[in-house]
Image (cartoon, rainbow, N blue to C red):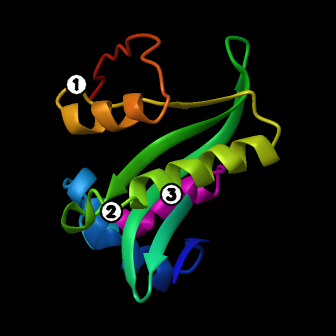
């Protein structure tokens, strides 16, 4: 049985770590737990897709508003377990995120993706997402 749940407890957040590590390898389990809980204090949600007993995909997201887009859902993290790809889990999770955005009266859903993640870019395009700009950054530390 496939279901999507929100991780709220330390146990649930830690259970998401093995998959999140595939996207964010710089974090240890301890720092992942600490950082996730810190972000949750400012509106971050961690959703996980579970098929039976196994977590197959994750999405970290938040709601926000800005002049450019109005109300929007921003996806910080979106990853399907590398051993579970091409089984429809990513699409189920993306569809769920779109529904959450609609429920919260968002007019748009946004995410950034690293330029090296070509498979992810193909996935986004196939599922109706348009490349709308470039993201620029300056490292300060």
Label 1, on which residue?
Answer: 115
Q: Position of residue 77 (x, y in %)?
A: 41, 47
Label 2, on which residue?
Answer: 87
The crowd level at tag 1 (other Cα within 10 Å; few <14, some 14-19, many 20+) is few
- The magenta region covers 32-45
Q: Position of residue 22 (x, y in %)?
A: 22, 58
Whether residue 62 sits left or right of residue 107 in the image: it is: left
Whether residue 99 sits left or right of residue 3 in the image: it is: right
Label 3, on which residue?
Answer: 92
* Above or below 122: residue 99: below
Q: Position of residue 71 (x, y in %)?
A: 76, 28
Foreground: disc 2 or disc 1 = 2
* Above or below 110: residue 42: below
Question: Given contact means CB atoms under 8 Å apart, are the residues at marks 2 and 1 in contact?
Answer: no
- For the point 55% across and 72% down, the residue is 7
Residue 91 visible in the snapshot: yes
What distance separates the C-alpha of mark 1 from that of mark 3?
24 Å
Q: Is residue 11 magenta?
A: no
């Amino acid at each position: 049985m496939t279901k999507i749940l929100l991780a709220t407890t330390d146990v649930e957040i830690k259970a998401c770590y093995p998959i999140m590590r595939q996207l964010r390898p710089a974090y240890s389990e301890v720092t992942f737990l600490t950082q996730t809980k810190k972000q949750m204090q400012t509106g971050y949600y961690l959703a996980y897709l579970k098929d039976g007993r196994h977590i197959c995909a994750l999405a970290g997201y938040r709601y926000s508003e800005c002049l450019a887009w109005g109300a929007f859902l921003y996806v910080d993290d979106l990853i399907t377990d590398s051993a579970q790809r091409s089984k429809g889990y990513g699409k189920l999770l993306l569809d769920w995120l779109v529904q959450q955005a609609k429920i919260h009266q968002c007019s748009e859903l946004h995410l950034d993706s690293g330029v090296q993640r070509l498979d992810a870019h193909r996935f986004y395009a196939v599922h109706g997402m348009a490349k709308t700009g470039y993201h620029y950054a300056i490292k300060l530390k």
